[in-house]
Image (cartoon, coloured by chain):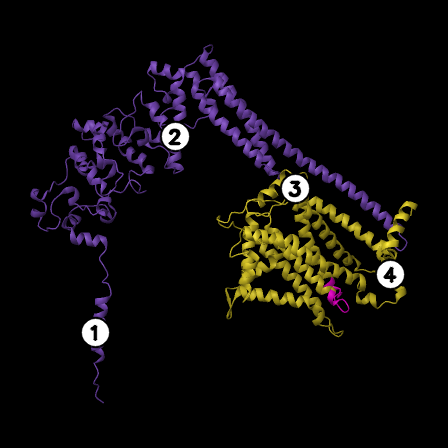
Chain colours: A yellow, B purple
């Protein structure tokens, strides 16, 4: 380390005791095996979250959360502000990619059984982050105040309103009244840029602390290996540098998507206009939306939609609590029950999503 | 066991009776009610062929006027001698020459008409008397149209009713019933191709194909009750009723004065009458499609002006079309074309004004508008080119960013390979 940098480091280290932290990271090891690639998915999701924060802050400089000005402000940003189009497009694409990578991260954790003791709370906090990411997407979708987002929000909040007993209250709180209006827009804006980011950041810090404290999970077959057979790399700088390599690649893909497939603005929302045809939620809600659509009006004594919402609610809670009810694999059985559950879940999501888009 | 209560049949009958008294008896339909009360209908519906549903559809029947409202007599009597006695005011079917007076009995009476339609005009009969139809009828020509020729006699529908023979969309066909009849028209020396020509004209297409009831039908130029071919002096006024600016510019121009001196119609010479075509810029100028060269020869001032005006319009439309093509390209590649659209609208407005100013036959006045329009079209074109260039810049920018990121990736990759435990 050159003298000058060493002096600055020494000055900081004297005050903040950074050396032990670096030593901790240097000594932290990451196992290398055929499933190591999944370790990077969380890092990519984290990188995309950072992109979201950075581009989001830039968007806030121009965005106006007002029924009359929201659409125009986004239009102004995209057409008049230098690189405004790029920032908005990256924000939209990164949001979608972030949800995608969070899903991949979650399923890789699920299939490698990384949720098992002692990482139960890491899983729970991760699932909460996924739920918050979806809510991020839902609230952000409305902000440009265009036709599609307006009616999708109407449909989305209507679905929330169908929840038994508390549904109407949720709907009114979300909408800031009986209908989707300018009040909904300012409410969604506040939720999107202040409330969720605060909660998300707190839980994210907790999630990362858990990971750092407990280290990377080793799949069963790696854990069984004697220590001299295990291959390890240092978290810092080896693993982190590989992480950065992937981040750069994702960044390149992100810019490609933003330049070649810029996110459209569409037409300004008009509450009095008839709903345009083909209203669809964002892709990550499609499997639920499609399920609710195809359910019969009545199932036994309940409304089909209500039953669907209850089903997804229960499945969501069960999924969050997976570490506490995991069905253990019996060595005499060929079928691994949790793998079957995971594959079924993925197939269900993929099939329903494709069906939703084909309709 | 003896039953001391009222027998069940008695109770049922009592309930039925009360029900009949309390519940409304199903009423007669309007048609049945009229037949039952109006003895004219009762007898004549058997004797004569009357239009289907005329009792319920006819505008007079709907207003409760009945047959006696026009024909007089006593509709309450089933004795035809009493019902159709002159003492009861019976006038019967009017002679053709008397039909306009027959209808005018009520339709020329403002006090009477006010009860039914306060805004209805009451000059139809007097207008008819001044029309070619009315004048000829007064002279004894019974082949001409009277009120019933257009409105029908029984089963008359309101003008606003789309089924009416005089509803805007149906007027050309109604006039054509007689004016398309070669045998009938041969006695008057009137051509019978007006309908075909009109149907192909810009007006006819708007009315008959696009169902635009605001487009002119026969009566909008010729009048309806006072139908008359427009005279030399009135053609310009007739067209100018809708094309106000064109008429004013033409009338104020030297050309307008010259047309007056030569006793020429004005609009018709260039645009035709029944077969008015959609105007095009090549109608002006010295090309083959230009109407100017019908009168102006090479070397005269009009010929020179026509060429200049044509050049001015062409200059504007050329830039405008280029800008429009580029705007479409901008839209296709997903760039912002909204502002270009606004500027093009202004250019288009200037183009319309310049085309209207052609009727001044003044190349300076036309030039002022075409210059303004060309400047706007050029501005739109520049904006479009800017957007297309920006699109290229973005792609090149992506290329540069990719090169930079790739270098970083390679550097990082090499660094990772150098690390001790890799």
Q: State whether the magenta stretch is mostly helix, strand or loop.
A: loop
The answer to which image quadrant residue B344 occupies is top right
Residue holding disc 4: A231
Can residue A333 be seen here? The reply is yes
Other residues around mark 4 within 10 Å, as few (<14) / some (14–19) / many (≥20): some
The C terminus of chain A lies in quadrant: bottom right
Alpha carbons under labels 1 and 4: distance apart? 103 Å
Alpha carbons under labels 3 and 2: distance apart? 49 Å
Alpha carbons under labels 4 and 3: distance apart? 45 Å
Alpha carbons under labels 1 and 3: distance apart? 84 Å
For the record, the magenta segment spans A109-121
Check the residue under mark 3 and report the chain it is in. A
Other residues around mark 1 within 10 Å, as few (<14) / some (14–19) / many (≥20): few
The disc at residue B201 is: 2
**Which residue shows up at 66% across the image and 64% down it?**
A344
A327 relative to B299, above or below:
below
The disc at residue A298 is: none
The disc at residue B14 is: 1
Furthest residue in direction top, as rendered: B299
**Tags 2 and 4 both on a single chain:** no
Of circles 4 and 3, the one toward us is: 3
The disc at residue A85 is: 3
Of circles 2 and 4, the one toward us is: 4
């Amino acid at each position: 380390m050159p003298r000058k940098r060493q002096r600055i480091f020494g000055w900081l280290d004297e005050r903040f005791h950074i050396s032990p932290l670096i030593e901790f990271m240097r000594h932290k090891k990451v196992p290398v095996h055929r499933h190591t690639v999944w370790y990077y998915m969380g890092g990519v999701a984290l990188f995309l979250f950072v992109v979201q924060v950075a581009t989001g802050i830039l968007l806030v400089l121009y965005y106006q959360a007002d029924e009359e000005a929201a659409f125009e402000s986004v239009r102004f940003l995209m057409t008049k502000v230098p690189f405004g189009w790029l920032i908005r497009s990256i924000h939209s694409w990164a949001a979608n990619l972030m949800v995608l990578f969070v899903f991949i991260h979650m399923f890789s954790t699920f299939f490698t059984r990384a949720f098992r003791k002692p990482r139960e709370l890491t899983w729970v906090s991760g699932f909460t982050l996924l739920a918050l990411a979806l809510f991020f997407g839902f609230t952000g979708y409305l902000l440009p105040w265009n036709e599609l987002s307006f009616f999708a929000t109407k449909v989305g909040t209507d679905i929330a309103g169908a929840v038994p007993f508390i549904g109407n209250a949720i709907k009114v709180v979300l909408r800031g009244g009986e209908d989707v209006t300018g009040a909904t827009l300012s409410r969604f804006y506040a939720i999107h840029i202040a409330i969720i980011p605060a909660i998300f950041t707190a839980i994210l810090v907790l999630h990362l602390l858990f990971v750092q404290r407990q280290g990377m999970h080793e799949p069963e077959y790696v854990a069984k290996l004697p220590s001299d057979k295990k291959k390890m790399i240092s978290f810092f700088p080896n693993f982190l540098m590989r992480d950065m390599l992937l981040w750069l690649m994702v960044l390149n893909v992100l810019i490609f998507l933003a330049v070649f497939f810029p996110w459209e603005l569409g037409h300004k929302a008009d509450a009095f206009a008839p709903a345009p045809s083909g209203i669809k939620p964002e892709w990550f809600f499609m499997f639920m939306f499609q399920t609710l659509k195809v359910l019969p009006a009545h199932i036994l004594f309940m409304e089909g939609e209500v039953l669907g919402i209850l089903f997804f609610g229960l499945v969501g809670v069960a999924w969050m609590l997976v570490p506490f009810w995991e069905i253990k694999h019996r060595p005499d059985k060929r079928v691994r029950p949790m793998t079957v559950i995971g594959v079924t879940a993925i197939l269900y999501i993929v099939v329903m999503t494709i069906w939703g888009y084909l309709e | 066991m003896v039953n001391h209560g009222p027998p069940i049949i008695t109770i049922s009958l009592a309930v039925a009776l009360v029900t009949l008294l309390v519940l409304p008896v199903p009423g007669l339909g309007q048609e049945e009610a009229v037949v039952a009360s109006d003895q004219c209908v009762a007898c004549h519906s058997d004797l004569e062929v009357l239009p289907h549903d005329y009792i319920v559809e006819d505008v007079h029947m709907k207003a409760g006027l009945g047959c006696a409202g026009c024909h007089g007599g006593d509709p309450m009597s089933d004795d035809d001698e009493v019902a159709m006695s002159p003492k009861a005011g019976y006038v019967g079917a009017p002679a053709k020459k008397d039909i306009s007076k027959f209808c005018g009995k009520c339709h020329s009476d403002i006090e009477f008409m006010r009860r039914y339609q306060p805004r209805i005009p009451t000059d139809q009969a007097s207008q008819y008397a001044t029309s070619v139809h009315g004048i000829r009828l007064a002279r004894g020509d019974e082949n001409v149209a009277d009120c019933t020729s257009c409105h029908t006699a029984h089963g008359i529908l309101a003008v606003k009713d789309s089924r009416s023979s005089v509803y805007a969309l149906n007027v050309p066909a109604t006039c054509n019933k007689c004016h398309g009849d070669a045998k009938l028209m041969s006695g008057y020396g009137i051509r019978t191709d007006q309908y075909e020509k009109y149907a192909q004209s810009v007006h006819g297409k708007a009315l008959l194909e696009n169902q635009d009831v605001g487009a002119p039908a026969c009566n909008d130029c010729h009048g309806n009750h006072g139908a008359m071919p427009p005279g030399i002096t009135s053609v310009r006024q007739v067209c100018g009723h809708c094309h106000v600016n064109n008429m004013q510019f033409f009338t104020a121009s030297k050309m307008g004065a010259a047309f007056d001196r030569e006793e020429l119609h004005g609009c018709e010479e260039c645009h035709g009458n029944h077969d008015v075509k959609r105007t095009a810029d090549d109608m002006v100028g010295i090309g083959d499609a230009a109407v100017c060269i019908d009168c102006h020869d090479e070397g005269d001032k009009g010929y020179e002006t026509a060429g200049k005006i044509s050049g001015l319009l062409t200059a504007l439309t050329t830039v405008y079309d280029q800008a429009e093509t580029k705007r479409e390209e901008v839209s296709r590649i997903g760039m912002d074309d909204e502002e270009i659209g606004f500027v093009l609208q202004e250019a288009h407005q200037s183009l319309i004004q310049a085309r209207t100013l052609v009727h001044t036959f003044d190349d300076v006045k036309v030039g002022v508008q075409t210059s303004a329009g060309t400047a706007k079209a050029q501005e739109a074109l520049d904006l479009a080119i800017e957007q297309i260039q920006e699109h290229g810049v973005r792609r090149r920018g992506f290329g540069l960013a990719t090169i930079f990121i790739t270098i970083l990736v390679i550097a990082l990759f090499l660094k990772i390979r150098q690390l001790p435990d890799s």
